[in-house]
Amino acid sequence: YVSQPKASQWIYEALAGKTKMLHYSGDTDGAVPTVGTQNWIATLNWNKTSEWKQYLVEGQVAGYWEQYEGGLTFGTVHGAGHMAPQFKPPQTYHLVFNWMFDRDI
């Protein structure tokens, strides 16, 4: 194991503008907190192309998402921990499926 100063951030920089990218977090994740993800995204210095928006599943807030130049979408899954698909399957599926097929999240 070799620790790198930028961890996996370099791959987002390398793929910017070449493909779309999704990074999502459970908003109760204690291992990789949402605020930490937001902080490293901020270090990319990419402008937002859409502001923070909520998405709903069965009429309930399921999470939030925003988009950045470079093709990055960042989303949260409300009430999920580190394993968002395990804790909140319908909400995670909604976010990922709609992002994959370029549908409104």
Image (cartoon, grey):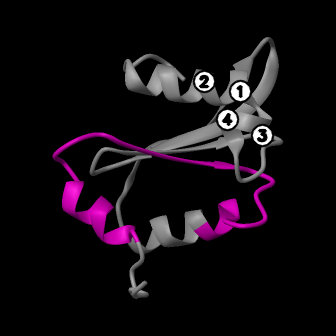
- Foreground residue, 32 or 105? 32
Callout 1–callout 2 Cβ contact below 8 Å: yes
Select label 4 or label 3 by which is in front. 4
Secondary structure of the residue carrying numbered label 2: helix
What amino acid is labelled 4 in the image?
A: Pro
Depicted 36 relative to depicted 94: above or below:
below
Secondary structure of residue under mark 1:
helix
Tell whether position 62 is magenta: no
Coordinates of residue 30 in the picture (x, y in percent): 78, 65
Determine the CA span between mark 4 and mark 3: 11 Å
Residue 78 image label: 3
Q: Which mark is residue 89?
A: 1
Per the image, the residue denoted by label 4 is: 85
Q: Which mark is residue 93?
A: 2
Where residue 14 sits: x, y (%)? 20, 62
Q: Amino acid at mark 2?
A: Tyr
Specify the segment rendered in magenta: 8-36
Count neighbours of disc 4 (C-alpha within 10 A) and say few if under 14, some if 14 to 19, many if 20 or more.
Answer: some
Q: Are marks 4 and 2 in contact (CB under 8 Å)?
A: yes
